[in-house]
Image (cartoon, coloured by chain):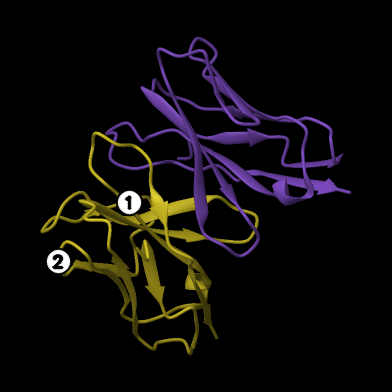
Chain colours: A yellow, B purple
Amino acid sequence: NAGVTQTPKFQVLKTGQSMTLQCAQDMNHNSMYWYRQDPGMGLRLIYYSASEGTTDKGEVPNGYNVSRLNKREFSLRLESAAPSQTSVYFCASRRDESRAEQFFGPGTRLTVL
Amino acid sequence: SQQGEEDPQALSIQEGENATMNCSYKTSINNLQWYRQNSGRGLVHLILIRSNEREKHSGRLRVTLDTSKKSSSLLITASRAADTASYFCAPPNQAGTALIFGKGTTLSVSS
């Protein structure tokens, strides 16, 4: 099992460009999450998907959109990147509401110039 | 707003010493988790403690929970250089649908 995978690992964008961060899990988990982590900060929740077909905003959703493509995949899209979106992005999954533990991917380091 | 707040922000110890990290949170919870993050990597789940538990052990880890004070602590005994990492407590949000992370405690263990 690969667990939670994220692509790409690194990305540099110019202001105004768009891109999609991909996340996939092979653990048959129902819930998936997108967080961002800025230097010296904890993780802040951007969006989450409690189950296939549902998505909800987290603490910092502005400037992002998400798609729960199927049970395995949960993508994060930046339509018009801004320097304030420079961050490390982590995807996570959780089996379901009966299990609290989240499993994290290795992260995508994004720089917006 | 963040729920989990760790203290201290940074901790430096020698190998073999114990490391204690504290966490405070704001609202009632039914469980609290601790995670570790090695530099530049994703978070790894360490331990979960439920609101009806006061203490829980896992190997060299000991976690306590005081719901009356809304606080938790993580003790790592006999620290090793490999324990060097950031440690985060993560109580759930009020809806129980996601976790709220603080800034973490950065632990440095020197040999």
Residue type at mark 1 is Gly
| Measured Cα–Cα span from mark 2 to mark 1 | 20 Å
Amino acid type of the residue that numbered disc 2 sits on in the rendered structure: Asn
Q: Residue at x 58, y 35 (%)?
A: B5
Q: Chain of mark 1?
A: A
Q: Quadrant of the N terminus of chain B?
A: top left
Q: Secondary structure at mark 1?
A: loop
Numbered badge on residue A70: 2
In this rendering, the label closer to the viewer, 2 or 1: 2
Q: Which mark is residue A58?
A: 1
Taking the image as shown, residue B36 lies to the left or right of residue A73, namely: right
Position of residue B33 in the picture relative to residue B103 (left or right): left
Residue furthest out toward the top: B68
The percent position of residue A93, horizontal first and vertical second, equals: 32, 53
Horizontal and vertical percent position of residue B110 = 86, 49
Q: Residues within 10 Å of mark 1 (few under 14, many from 20)?
A: some
Question: Foreground: A82 or A51?
Answer: A51
- Number of numbered markers: 2
* Labels 2 and 1: the sequence-earlier one: 1
Q: Quadrant of residue A67?
A: bottom left
x and y, in percent, of residue B108 in the image: 79, 48
- Residue A13 screen position, x and y as percent: 47, 87
Residue B92: quarter of image: top left
